[in-house]
Amino acid sequence: MSKPKVATTSLAGCFGCHMSLLDIDERILELVELIDFDKSPIDDIKTFSNRCAVGLVEGGCCNEENVHVLQEFRKHCDVLISFGDCATMGGIPAMRNNIPLTECFDEAYRSGLTVYNPDNIVPNDPELPLLLDKVYPAHEVVKMDYFLPGCPPSADTLWAVLTALLTNQPVELPYELLKYD
Amino acid sequence: MGDAMKIEQICKSFNNDRTRLMDIVRTIQETFGYVPPEHYELIAREANTHRVEVESVVSFYSFLSDRKQGGVVLRLCNDIIDRFKGADAVAEAFEKELGISMGETTPDGLFTLEWTACIGMSDQAPAALANDTVLTHLTPEKVPGILEALRKNPDPQALVAECGDGGNADPLVKAMVQNNICERGEVLLADNDPEAGLRKAMEKTPEEVIADMKESGLRGRGGAGFLAGLKWEFTRNAKGDGKYILCNADEGEPGTFKDRVLLTERADLMIEGMTVAAYCIGAETGIVYLRAEYAYLRALLEEVLNRRRAAGLLGNSICGRDGFNFDIRIQMGAGAYVCGEESSLISSCEGTRGDPGDRPPFPAIAGYKVAPTAVNNVETYCCAARVMDKGPVWFENIGTEHSSGTKMLSICGDCERPGIYELPFGVTVAELLEKVGAENAAAVQIGGPSGQMLDRSQYGRAISFEDLPTGGSIMVFGRQRDLLEVVDAFMEFFVDESCGYCVPCRVGNVLLRNRLERIRNGKGIPEDLAYLEKLGISTRRMSRCGLGQTSPNPILSTLENFRPIYNALVREDRSGLAKSFDVLRAVEPACELTGRRSVIFHA
Ligand SMILES: Cc1cc2nc3c(=O)[nH]c(=O)nc-3n(C[C@H](O)[C@H](O)[C@H](O)COP(=O)(O)O)c2cc1C
Ligand code: SF4
Ligand code: SF4
Ligand code: FES
């Protein structure tokens, strides 16, 4: 039997959650015994090549491209996990949610104290995905199956969850792995 | 006189006492039309408190404002009862005639227009307050006339052409409010022998009075139904001097208006009951916490207090008994539902925000000014006086095994005869519906938004502490009503009234309401129902006070009793994409800002 496939992505996140995944250190060798990575920044595969068992999503959606990628993940993965507070709740990027988008643009590009912008323009290259009105946690855009809190969830937490899922065991997360303060 | 001097005088008239901050800022609001933020510092200094205390009181209570309000503040009840009776059309008429929206003040400074929660006139809806004056049975057609009259004479009291019945016609009240007493029970609304309860209580020792109260089985009429005699015993036995008797006349649960009628018709009986409590607890000071919406009854109550002082029924040496000293003051509220919760009520009496406190310690141990305090509802005190007069056995024999006596029920909504029904505990919902003329009711809400909504199959159940407890609110909904609109309105009420102290209540109620709206908009999936249940139960369990502990009830009780309505609205979705998320709407502001369309989604 071929190994199950895992895809990962970083949407409106800081890549900290992926760094935490890399923090499993040498256990990554054990991990690749269990799985193959499909679309993921870890192996730099840009598009899905196969149906995946698990999709790990870091970050929520702050722009249209995030939405597109997340919808693709939903189509190609059996199980989707929001990992990290940004995916679960919007996190730091969602701090802009109380401020209308125009005001964010004004502050960042037009009238902020350190801004020099005589043409009074905003970034508008067709290559740039359009921002959304707010930052949405992943589950407000597609159905998510599991949520792993933490900023970021620790490597041990991720390890425990992934190995349990991939070996068909119930996930056991002792208090230490879910306690953050 | 300059503003600063006026403020200094107002503070002085309350002895520069920080615990009277509520009265101080209320008086300033009356004088200036608002509480001027530039004077917070001064008020704080004069009242011996901190600026932040002043600001937090002003921002907490909905009847206080830091912006200049109109000479006449029009507050329309936005409860679903009023909405179903046409409050929205009345609001529109006001908006149109005044040229402003709800929440705004006319440029000429004459009018402010606002929504407010139930003002206790649910049997004569749509209702509103014009400053302290109650306006009932409003229609859009009446609006131009009302405004014309107010433009000629800015005193809203002049709008009262015809007074209501009974005490409403008293020269000190002169309100258009009707009592709508439909049934009188033998405990409260029957004729009673004035002061007989107090007289008989004073023939006994305080311990004997408490024993009688316990034997009568009288349970609190305002909330949790705690045994009044037991509460009084705890308060009596608690260590500490200067104990207090507080009467809860906040009546904030939407659809409850029975205390309004007791205050209008049985104020003496209520104060007699408080005096009995003072006698057996050994308290010298009492406070009646009167909700701001009932300010029109204040002069009447003050008069009753004065009359009783003159008759030796309040003050020093009551009824000639040396050492039995007890007097009462009225504390006005300022528009906050949570202040009906006893620890909030105490905070409010102490002149701070109406934040609920942690319990224990209960008020009986450490209440007003940390002294042992008995807090009871208006109706409880009225019953207590009657228990003392007619004896515990008489009282115990009325009602059911665990619910002695009668209950004042205020019934409103889709029925022919809304109003006050004083009935023995044990009366069934079906019997009630027959009395009020609503046999075909599709749903009955028992106990206000914090209570439960019953379907037809449960109309055999009985009003009582053991089956269907209620502070008095009973709302009837006919078949034409969208029950989830009712639920939504109730959730809006809790979102507005949450004091914001704890996350489950402050945030949970908003999330519950958002998800409910998603379902009502046809964007819901079956999993949303489980979400509502789970979040509702967490909110109920994790909230600090009774408000948050009951706020999910509209949703939880309809999920239980009216599940088919929800089931019909949600649809299974296999795509895994959230129906409630509309990417084109989400990119709209960015499209406008950049002047281009989405390459990915605008196909
Ligand atoms: C949010 C909230 C609002 C309340 N509002 C009232 C009220 O308006 N009137 C009232 O008598 N009790 C109200 N209560 C109940 C009081 O906390 C308290 O239990 C009651 O006044 C005790 O008096 P009783 O034992 O005579 O009923 C409220 C409770 C909560 C949690
Ligand atoms: S949850 Fe924390 S670590 Fe993860 S993407 Fe967000 S900010 Fe970064
Ligand atoms: S439950 Fe609600 S009203 Fe009560 S303390 Fe918490 S936030 Fe305030
Ligand atoms: S006055 Fe409107 S519902 Fe009570």
Image (cartoon, helix red, strand yellow):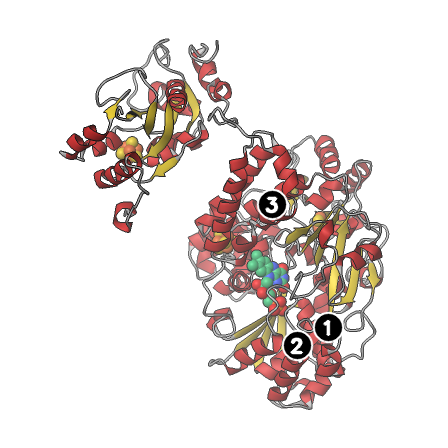
The alpha-carbon separation of the residues under discs 2 and 1 comes to 8 Å
Numbered label attached to residue B349: none
- Looking at the image, can residue B315 be seen? no
Residue B277 vs residue A52, the one in the foreground:
A52
Q: Where is residue B416 in the image (x, y as percent from the top left)?
A: 84, 50
Q: Where is residue A72 in the image (x, y as percent from the top left)?
A: 39, 20
Q: What element carries label 1?
A: loop
Q: Total marks drawn?
A: 3
Query: Disc 3 designates what residue?
Result: B559
Residue B108 vs residue B565, the one in the foreground:
B565
Residue at position x 29%, y 34% from top?
A166
Looking at the rendered structure, the kind of residue marked 3 is Leu
Query: Disc 2 designates what residue?
Result: B217
The chain carrying label 3 is: B
Pick the quarter of the image with the N terminus of chain A. top left
Query: Disc 1 designates what residue?
Result: B405
Looking at the rendered structure, the kind of residue marked 1 is Gly
Which is nearer the N-term, disc 2 or disc 1? 2
Residue B533, relative to residue B362: is it above or below?
above
User: Are dots 1 and 3 in contact, CB under 8 Å?
Assistant: no
Q: Nearer the viewer, mark 3 or mark 2?
A: 3
Residue A16, relative to residue B315: is it above or below?
above
